[in-house]
Amino acid sequence: MTRRSPPPAPHPDMAEQPFWISFSDLMTALMALFLVAMSVALLAITSDIAKTEDQKAGREEDIDAFMTALSRAAADFPGVSVRGRVVDFGERARFETNSHRLNPEQVKLLREMTPQILRLAREPLGRKWLKRVVVEGFADARGSYLYNLNLSLQRAERLLCILIAPEASATLSAEDRLMVRDLFLVSGSSFNALKANPEASRRLELRLEFLELGETRAASHDLPLEEEPRCPLDGR
């Protein structure tokens, strides 16, 4: 009988060689997928950042266009200027010492100028970006801080009285007066932003604030306009 020789013994690495080849290919594939995923994620983030920057630039351009239109409107009222996002009435709305009252000529100017702001607020750029108008009253440095702070608030409040009072209807429509109530906010400053002399410091300014990206303007009050016969300041 012919004796059969046993098969040759396998090489020690032959059993493991196919496994390590497939694991290496798997790691290579996973690395490639990881790189692709990272590239897509970075592209998306970069795209979002670029889109946001474009939106910010567009917002600034819109606001600049709004303020340019307001500057043109203010040019019809000598003495009124627009600086950045502030309407400065200058000598046309100066107060006497320790007083929050304005003379008839000043009242007439404020009632004629304000509808120009409201007109722009109703236009597309105003509806899109204008958040509110802050009425800022100022006092000079004479007297105590708290006294002047209260006086500057009264000076800002005086403008609201002038614009909303029943006699304002000769210049402002009922719609305008309602919009003033919803859009205007009173603020006061005591020793802040002093001018070169006390007379120039006793003034009124309107500071326009604009919406940020994604922000919406607060809803209007669904309430009728109160026809109070007199400004509350006149009873003090």
Image (cartoon, grey):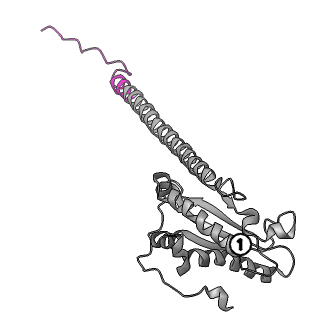
Q: Residue at x 60, y 54 (%)?
A: 73
Which residue is labeled 1 in the image?
137
Q: How many marks?
A: 1
Q: Dot 1: what SS?
A: strand
Q: On screen, 33 above or below 54?
A: above
Residue nearer the viewer, 80 or 169: 169
**Residue furthest out toward the bottom:** 235
Nearer-the-camera pick, 209 or 30: 209
Above or below for 26 versus 129: above
Question: Residue 51 at x, y = what percent?
Answer: 49, 41
The amino acid marked with disc number 1 is Gly
Given residues 58 and 160, the one toward you in this image is: 160
Residue drawn 67% across the image and 60% down it: 87
The picture quadrant where one finds residue 28 is top left
Q: Which residues are magenta?
A: 1-23
Asked if the stretch drawn in magenta spans residue 99, the answer is no
Residue 92 place in picture, x, y as percent: 73, 65
Q: Residue at x 52, y 73 (%)?
A: 170
Horizontal placement of 108 versus 180: left or right? right
Q: Nearer the viewer, residue 186 or 104?
A: 104
Q: Main secondary structure of the magenta part?
A: loop
Quadrant location of the C terminus? bottom right
Graded by Cα atoms within 10 Å as few (under 14), some (14 to 19) or many (20 or more), the crowding at tag 1 reads many
Please say if 151 is above or below 211. Answer: below
